[in-house]
Every structure is written in structure tokens, then in C-alpha cells.
Image: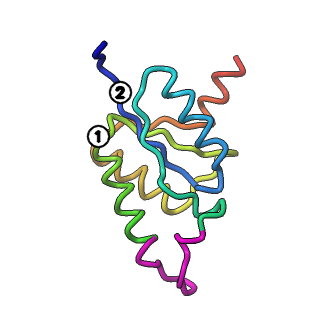
Amino acid sequence: MVGTYKVITLCGSTRFKDAFIEMQKKLTLAGNIVISVGLFGHSGDDEVWENMDEGTLTKTKEMLDDMHKRKIDMADEIFVINVGGYIGSSTRSEINYAKAAGKPVRYYTDFQNDQKH
């Protein structure tokens, strides 16, 4: 079987690792190709922050942020993991990038609300 599948890139704070994994599974089972983060810096992947001074980005964090924008380039849409409505500055930048490229943006909180009804 060869199908046509929508490509969705997950965006959001890596502190929400469980929600990333939950949505990757749900969106995949719904017939989508899901692109996620490679590291969870806020959930234990310390390589993201090595040698980081206050107010600066590490080369690794800078590379990961740029790489995630390339993942957005490959996607048909993005799905923002915004648990409790939280959207940090990196995620806000990714949302703006996706919108500027004309990509639809969906949100975890909207998905959660839809599941309740």
C-alpha cells in the first residue's frame, strides 16, 4: 500500500515530553507522518544546555532551533504542544515561522478540548 499522508511537525516546550509522545502516537495512528524534536532539553537531555551562559545560546541549542525550522519547512502543518496554554519564546518563533510560510497551526489545548466533547 502506498498512501498519501499529511506531514505534521510537533512544536512546543520540551518540558512536555509526555504530551509530545502522546501526540506523536495519536497523530501517527490517525494516518500522519509526524516529525518531532530530537532532544528533550527541559526533560533531561542536558546536551542542549552544555556550556551555556546566562542569556546566551549554546551552539547545540542554536543548531537545534535552526534544525526545527527545517522540520517545519518539510511539514504540511505544525501541531503545537501547549500544555496549559504555555508557549515559550522558541515555540512562538516557530509558530510565526510556520504562519509566515502559510502552514496551518493546530494546538494541543484545542485537541484536548475536542476530546472532552
Give the SS element for disc 1: loop
Give the SS element for disc 2: strand
Quarter in which the N terminus is drawn: top left
Residue 55 colored magenta? yes
Mark 2 neighbour class, 10 Å CA radius: few under 14, some 14 to 19, many 20 or more: some
Residue 44 colored magenta? no
| Residue furthest top as drawn | 1
Quarter in which the C terminus is drawn: top right
Range of the magenta residues?
A: 46-60
At a point 59% along the width and 37% down the height, the residue shown is 108
Say whether residue 53 is left or right of residue 68. right
Please, what is the three-letter code of the amino acid marked with disc 1? Gly
On screen, residue 23 above or below 97:
above
Please, what is the three-letter code of the amino acid marked with disc 2? Lys
At a point 46% along the width and 70% down the height, the residue shown is 61
The scheme the figure's colours follow is rainbow
On screen, residue 89 above or below 29:
below
Give the prevailing secondary structure in the magenta stretch. Answer: loop
Mark 1 neighbour class, 10 Å CA radius: few under 14, some 14 to 19, many 20 or more: few
- At which x and y percent is residue 90? 48, 61
Residue contact at pointers 1 and 2, CB within 8 angstroms: no
Residue 6 is tagged as: 2
At a point 40% along the width and 31% down the height, the residue shown is 33
Mark sitting earlier along the chain (1/2): 2
- At which x and y percent is residue 104? 38, 35
Say whether residue 79 is left or right of residue 66. right
- At which x and y percent is residue 80? 52, 43
Q: Nearer the viewer, mark 1 or mark 2?
A: 2
Residue 102 is tagged as: 1
